[in-house]
Amino acid sequence: MGSRTAQDDLINLFDFRGGVNDADSPLALLENQVREAKNVDFREGLLACKRKGAIAIDLSGSVFARNSPRLLSTSTGGTAGGTTVNVTVPAVTDTDGTGNTHHVLVVKVNSKTAAVTVITFNAVAMTAQASGSNGAAGSAGIWRASTPLLAGGTVAMTFAAATNASVIVERWGQVDVASSFGSNPSATGTSATPALEFASDPTFGISDLVICGAATIVAVNAVFRTQIAIVATGTSRLAASYWPAGNLPTVRFAWTLSASVDWLMLGVILKGRLSSIALSDLFIVSLIRHQAGNELSNDELWAMDNDGRLDRRVAGTWQGGVPYGNSSVGFFPRRVVGASLHGKLFLAGATNANRATVWDGTVLRYAGFGQPAVPGVADTAVGGTYTGTRYFRFRYTEQVAGVTVRRSEPTTTVVFVPNGAFNGAIITKPAAGGYASGEQETHWEIEASVDNALFYRITTLPVGTTTYTDTVAYAIGYATGGVSTLSETIGEYLPPFACRFVTVDDDRMLFADNSQFSAVNGSRVQWTPVRGDEGVGNDERIPIAVRHFRDLDGLNGGGLTNMLGGINGAVFLSKSARVYTMTRTGIENNAYDLHTETETRGMILDSMIGGVDATGAACVYGLDANVGLIRVGGREGLADLMYYRRTVWATVDKTPSFLPTRIVFFAKYWFVIVWPVIGQGSGGPSTAMVYDVRTRGWTDYTGPSNQVAGAVMFPDTTTLELMPFVGISSLLTASFAELDTGVTDFGTRYRGYIVSRPYHRGNLYSKFAALGAVLHAKAATGVTIGLALIRNFGLSVQRRTKSIAPQFTETHVYAGIDDATIAECNALQCELGDPSTFTGAQLDQQWVLDALSVRVSKADDTGGKP
């Protein structure tokens, strides 16, 4: 606070821990609040200390250390019954800073009845890359410019005869031209749903594909493919799409046609450039801490960039990508969240299938099992007396060291009526396909029944064994025929649905918000059994025999925006205008009671974090669209924490189209750090707003490491302290950093300082003068503090500097600043911190300040009375 002594000749500044207040008039600031607080903390010193910096995290060896190919422009054309086509191609801007070397022009042509004889770009012949034909689909081809060019021009082609033809011309940047185009997969057939699957480029390039057919091309059939263009000229149909850069082992392209027709598909691989050039447009948008074991040193840092590429950092080393169970596994770019349980990492985000996704330590796959296709059942060829109507089905399982750890729901039951003249029934496992393919199934369990009510497991076989012969006599039956294992009830092994949120509570997984696949389930929460429950793979199944889900007010209040478990025995959830808690009941068919904490506050997407209040009690923090940071729970209860920053919060984008506002709880200092949406908030696009839980003070951090696209608390490699790790959303060569480390911000220096509230001498008519000052600070050799005396809100300013080096071995110093003078003051503010004139290495200093006393006159410098 600031106050005057009984003699009325001192202004004492100390205890600024109320932090910055940039909402109220300067005259209305409280005693312990300041007008500005930039790059300082209140964790040390009664006034402030300079914040620590940030260091870049090396991306070498990661999938992020490679540029992704960028589609720069698309042009189309065609002819109906002609022999020539000219397509005008615009010039493009070099987006990777390396000139023409890393750009390529790709031309895709579908000619109904005649072949291309000549194709040029600006009169220079192009290079044939792939071609093919299939009946009524005609012929198709892919060409590329022999020399990479950025200039605009004309693609000209001539056909051998009059034809219907469609053309798509694409300009790509950031392409490794020397090693691209090495693989040209193709497929032909007759279908309304053509598809092609082929091995992905091992260096994380992208694949681009052509489809042609006589029917109308309706759409691309997967959420992970991006449609480039569809062109129809006469009876010629042509379409192109691409798979964004990623690290899947295989890529599957699929389309929907309006009818079953002949089709031809051609592919071409475009590899991204290596990191020898500047990475551009790279955002680390999602960061997740995976607790893979009991020790912090085993934690893995997972990251996803804005191309949807995933990688994990283990013991400080990037793994070069994440192995996938099959090509349908993956996420839309820009958002993925996760939670760890039993050494697995469950991930939530927009997916290709209505299944939750899990990393099992080996591959990233869908949780549980999808329902397998029905088996084939037929009589044997050996004579016998096998009779009686039977019912057969099977399940996939996964075994580890001979123990079943995961099981699927059974297939649809096959009713089999034996011929009666043979000795048994041959059950044939269907060919792998759909989501049952590549899910790491190791065995299949065959189940049989004579009454279609009670099914018994009659055998378990490795998946490599595709048939089994059942010879059990009907009169004996399966219950007494040496098979005594009653099958699991239908509905016990349903996999968790695709979700937007995952969390852990009481040794079980919770999944929430299935709105991607079912709008009515936007506020549904479902949960698994606990690990010790009967059954196998309990963390990957949702039984329906008991009620393992709950809907939160239906869709009243909208869909869910956050879910967080393990907070003082409760699971916290939010909508945009509601906050809930779910607490355990111990009753299997009603595992959670629901409590509405408030309907007057809510939280925006991905803004809920766990922390403690000022008393140390567990609580949650979140960002309400109307009032900013709020606290729910703990001993202090519901509270709005941004009242004095309300004008700043009003400038923040609450529903961004790209990146949401990020938030973490820094337990080491009891800080809540909020990074506003890029381009919004206090101080512009490179600012973090930091709330000190213990002192209730706010401060701002500026600098490039605070332009945040993703954030997570993760153990430091050396100290194992949980530190903020952030992905940077600016176009920097390195775009990943650890905070609270070093003295520069991601290599950029920054100035730390505070500006006090204004001080007066009783009333607005009173004038006074500052006659000197004494600073109390933590001793630091080589550190210089700047003091600015600000008269009447900037009417004039006097600046002074003072060393706080110790004279001997004292830990703190009293540094007199005798020349700290200024006259004719109606109001006086003090600025303390790095001198405003410091630049370069002069700013590489850390300091802790406790108090400042300014001696003031009893009369102004004209001799009048105060």
Image (cartoon, helix red, strand yellow):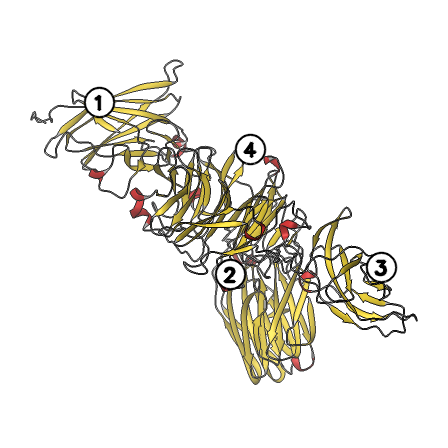
Three-letter code, disc 1:
Gly
CA distance for labels 4 and 3: 59 Å
CA distance for labels 3 and 1: 102 Å
Q: Which of the two discs, 3 and 1, sits closer to the camera?
A: 3
According to the picture, the residue beneath numbered tag 3 turns out to be 481
- Neighbours of disc 4 within 10 Å: few (<14), some (14-19), many (20+): few
Q: Under tag 4, what secondary structure? A: loop
Q: Which of the two discs, 2 and 4, sits closer to the camera?
A: 2
Is 343 on the left-hand or right-hand side of 425?
left
Mark 3 vs 1: CB contact within 8 A: no
Is 105 on the left-hand or right-hand side of 679?
right
Q: Which mark is residue 521?
A: 2
Nearer-the-camera pick, 336 or 226: 336
Q: Is residue 236 above or below residue 518?
A: below
**Among the two numbered marks 2 and 1 on one chain, the one whose residue lies closer to the N terminus:** 2
Mark 2 vs 1: CB contact within 8 A: no
**Among the two numbered marks 2 and 4 on one chain, the one whose residue lies closer to the N terminus:** 2
Mark 4 vs 1: CB contact within 8 A: no
Three-letter code, disc 4:
Leu
Q: Under tag 2, what secondary structure? A: helix
Nearer-the-camera pick, 717 or 181: 717
Is 74 on the left-hand or right-hand side of 771?
right
Q: Under tag 1, what secondary structure? A: strand
**Among the two numbered marks 4 and 1 on one chain, the one whose residue lies closer to the N terminus:** 4
- Neighbours of disc 3 within 10 Å: few (<14), some (14-19), many (20+): few
Q: Answer whether residue 359 is visible to the viewer in this image.
A: no
Q: Which mark is residue 772?
A: 1
